[in-house]
Image: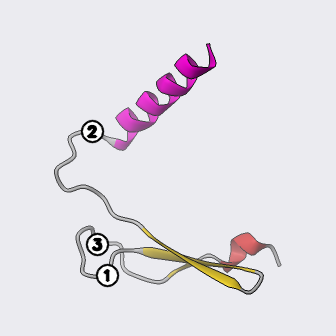
Amino acid sequence: MSSEKNIQNVAGTTAGAENPPALVKKIGRTTYIVRIHFSETSTETMSDKIKRMLKNEIQQMG
């Protein structure tokens, strides 16, 4: 079984919740818990952020 299949959603997906969404992944005998959150005051869309990140990456390459 691939380690990618060990990723589980262990919390809800509501932003700003008391228990933010989290992913759990076991690698060997170590368990990693990754919690995520989203800014409620952000004005940048996900699409805008990805474009900005790609643009910055291209500028660093050149």
Q: Residue at x 44, y 29 (%)?
A: 51
Quadrant of the frame with the N terminus:
bottom right
Quarter assignment of residue 21: bottom left
Label 3: few (<14), some (14–19) or many (≥20) C-alpha neighbours in 10 Å: few
For the residues marked 2 and 3, what is the alpha-carbon distance in whole angstroms?
19 Å
State which tag comes first along the sequence, 2 or 3: 3
> Looking at the picture, does residue 1 appear above or below residue 58?
below
Q: Residue furthest right?
A: 1
Q: Is residue 26 above or below residue 41?
A: below
For mark 2, give the secondary structure: loop
Q: CA distance from mark 3 to mark 1?
A: 9 Å
Q: Categorize mark 2 by other alpha carbons within 10 Å: few (<14), some (14-19), many (20+).
A: few
In the picture provided, is 21 more to the left or to the right than 60?
A: left
**What residue range appears in magenta?**
46-62
**Picture layout, residue 43 above or below residue 62:** below
Residue at x 27%, y 38% (from the top left corner): 44
Residue on which the image places disc 3: 14
Magenta stretch, overall SS: helix
What amino acid is labelled 3 in the image? Thr
Residue 44 image label: 2
Nearer-N-terminus badge (3/1): 3
Sequence-wise first label, 2 or 1: 1
Q: Nearer the viewer, mark 3 or mark 1?
A: 1
> Amino acid under label 2?
Glu
Q: Which residue is mark 1?
A: 19
- Residue 10 place in picture, x, y as percent: 47, 83
